[in-house]
Image (tube, rainbow, N blue to C red):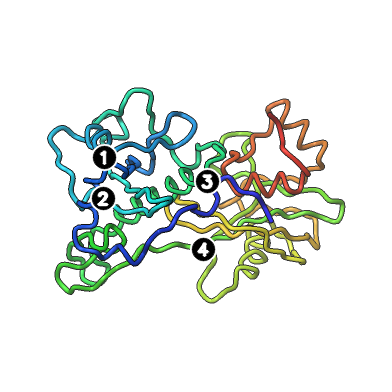
Amino acid sequence: MLDLPLAAVAHDRAAHRRTKPGLLDELLARPATRLLLVSSGRVATDGRMPVLLSAEEAVAAGPAGTPPSAAEHFFLGESDDVPYVARLLPGTADTGGTGLPDGLTWTTPRELTDSGDALTTGLAVEAVALANWHDRAARCPRCGRPTEVAAAGWVRRCVHEGVEHYPRTDPAVIMSIVDDDDRLLLGRGPSWPPGSMSVLAGFVEPGESAEHAVAREAMEEAGLAVRQIEYRASQPWPMPASLMLGFRARAETTELRPDGDEVSELRWFTRAELAAAHVDGSLRLSGRASIARALIEEWYGGRIGG
């Protein structure tokens, strides 16, 4: 299986504790509690990895005069008797409206490097995914009335109907496709910068398996029939709330037909061609925090570049 930088969250999410009355107030009063700042799909980092703050430090980073409240915090879980909480700051924080402690900066999960710390990386992914859901779920999808936060941030309850809504995760497939000459297929989206390429990916549609989604996406985006579809690993990807299911597959055909919508350019690469293009800068690959890079480097047989 693949060794992924954005690994499974290495802590106990303690779901049984989420409904405890006053849980967040209790945790925020504990000196051991550590908080992760979140704003506009980003987390506070030292430029390399997420930074965990004390409750006092985290509150000081928020808007002046804003008291701690359950509405702007959610419980992430515990590890070794240390509770972890996300503090959601207004969107203006992303442009410097609230400021950050010295040495910290806003970073998206996509920009995170492999810090080697599965705990903090996993907490960051979880926090951003939850924050994105809260941003989209402010109103009930049934009646359109406002919803309120419950269960320490893991539920939103309709104030009119009392119906509870829970965070959702959308499954998507991502796949390395290799032909009989052991060449790897890479594609570029129409809006991507020149030279940026990655493996194909797409959402799983209603009524289909993940394997069927791999075959459908390969045909739709590249005009390829594939076989030997093998699962490799999964990775949470909170942009905004997906679970990437990684596969590799063998191409039955090699003629490429980009659909022009999702994919504007396609190319087969040998290992030597990929390495040379990466060195001269004509090829820009997905970041090391992504399962896309892991799938590419699994085919390549090792780390690409420095």
Three-letter residue code for mark 2? Leu
Task: Give the total number of marks visible in the rendering.
Answer: 4
The answer for how far apart the CA atoms under marks 3 and 1 are is 22 Å
Q: Distance between the residues labelled 2 and 1?
A: 9 Å
Separation of marks 2 and 3 at Cα, in angstroms: 22 Å
Q: Name the residue under label 2.
A: 27
Q: Which of marks 3 and 1 is nearer the N terminus?
A: 1
Q: Nearer the viewer, mark 4 or mark 1?
A: 1
Residue marked by disc 1: 55
Name the N-terminal-most of marks 3 and 4.
3
Which disc number belongs to residue 171? 4
- Residue at 27 percent across and 33 percent down: it is 57
- Furthest toward the right, the residue is 181
Point out residue 6 in the picture as x, y percentages from the top left corner: 54, 47
Q: What element carries label 3?
A: helix
Looking at the image, residue 59 lies above or below residue 208 = above
